[in-house]
């Protein structure tokens, strides 16, 4: 498939989470990914967008931007916000680490993004926002299960 | 999400259908807690995930919350028939050591 690009911008409302993950999955369908790969992508996008709603904007209205690019059968996703930023990225990406333990948060969001995607990176500046980069091979020769 | 229930002896089975995420979780949490409160004599709660088409880490938090509630009421909690996507999320978290899969 030739190079393709998608950009979505939407309010940080919880009702937009399903829209975001379904839109990214639909964008990939032309590359014939397996159901397992699509499922991994949807879950990772949902985690990234949820982080923007819950942590970056803390329930206040903000803009979430999701950009996707397909090149050489790989999907590159960038999820960005202009929210409060992450205090300590090293801590935040640890499994089960959560700043909101009383809200039934599992602290597994970043772990799922790291595990389900082939490549993952997060940059954040306090008071300016966070950007998550993820890559997934859409037709891997040997698929991780 | 849709929440359905069936009671058989000491077993309260709660069947969830739909997509579990940050948006749907509050409603499902309230519905399940209400069902547990209405069945204080149940000894075992089984949450059936067969028709949960999508679940992110919100589902882990939801299940741990219900596990704690069940434990306070001297009930055990199990999950039943998660699809491959939900199963992958739940396996990664290690939650099955706390909440067995049946």
Image: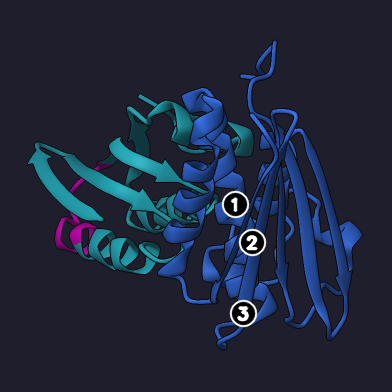
Q: Are marks 2 and 3 on the same chain?
A: yes
Front tag of 1 and 3: 3
Whole-number angstrom distance, CA of label 2 to CA of label 1: 9 Å
Label 1 crowd bin: few (<14), some (14–19), many (20+), radius 10 Å? many
Q: Quadrant of the C terminus of chain A?
A: top right
Specify the segment rendered in magenta: B35-44
Residue A122: % across, % down = 83, 57
Q: Is residue B39 magenta?
A: yes
Residue A92: % across, % down = 80, 60
Q: Is residue A38 magenta?
A: no
* Chain identifier matching the cyan colour in the rendered picture: B
Does the CB distance between marks 2 and 1 fall below 8 Å? yes
Q: Are marks 1 and 3 on the same chain?
A: yes
Q: Is residue A59 left or right of residue A72?
A: left
- The residue indicated by pointer 2 is A66
- The residue indicated by pointer 3 is A63
Does the CB distance between marks 1 and 3 fall below 8 Å? no
Q: Element under label 2?
A: strand
Q: Is residue A72 left or right of residue A11?
A: right
């Amino acid at each position: 498939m030739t190079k393709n690009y998608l950009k979505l911008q939407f309010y940080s409302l919880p009702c937009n989470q399903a829209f975001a993950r379904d839109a990214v999955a639909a964008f990939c369908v032309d590359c014939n990914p397996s159901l397992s790969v699509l499922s991994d992508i949807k879950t990772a996008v949902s985690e990234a967008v949820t982080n923007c709603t819950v942590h970056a904007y803390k329930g206040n209205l903000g803009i979430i931007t999701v950009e996707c690019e397909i090149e050489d059968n790989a999907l590159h996703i960038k999820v960005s916000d202009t929210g409060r930023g992450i205090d300590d990225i090293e801590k935040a990406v640890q499994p089960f680490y959560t700043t909101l333990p009383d809200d039934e948060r599992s602290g597994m969001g970043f772990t799922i993004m790291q595990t389900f995607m082939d490549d993952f990176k997060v940059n954040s500046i306090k008071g300016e926002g966070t950007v998550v980069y993820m890559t997934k091979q859409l037709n891997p020769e040997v698929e991780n299960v | 999400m849709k929440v359905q229930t069936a009671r058989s002896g000491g077993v309260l089975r709660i069947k969830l259908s739909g997509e579990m995420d940050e948006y749907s979780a509050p409603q499902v949490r309230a519905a399940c807690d209400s069902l547990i409160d209405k069945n204080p004599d149940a000894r075992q709660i089984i949450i059936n995930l067969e028709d949960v088409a999508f679940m992110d880490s919100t589902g882990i938090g939801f299940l741990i919350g219900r596990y704690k509630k069940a434990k306070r009421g001297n009930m055990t909690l199990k999950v039943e028939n998660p699809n491959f996507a939900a199963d992958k999320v739940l396996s990664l978290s290690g939650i099955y050591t706390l909440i067995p899969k049946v």
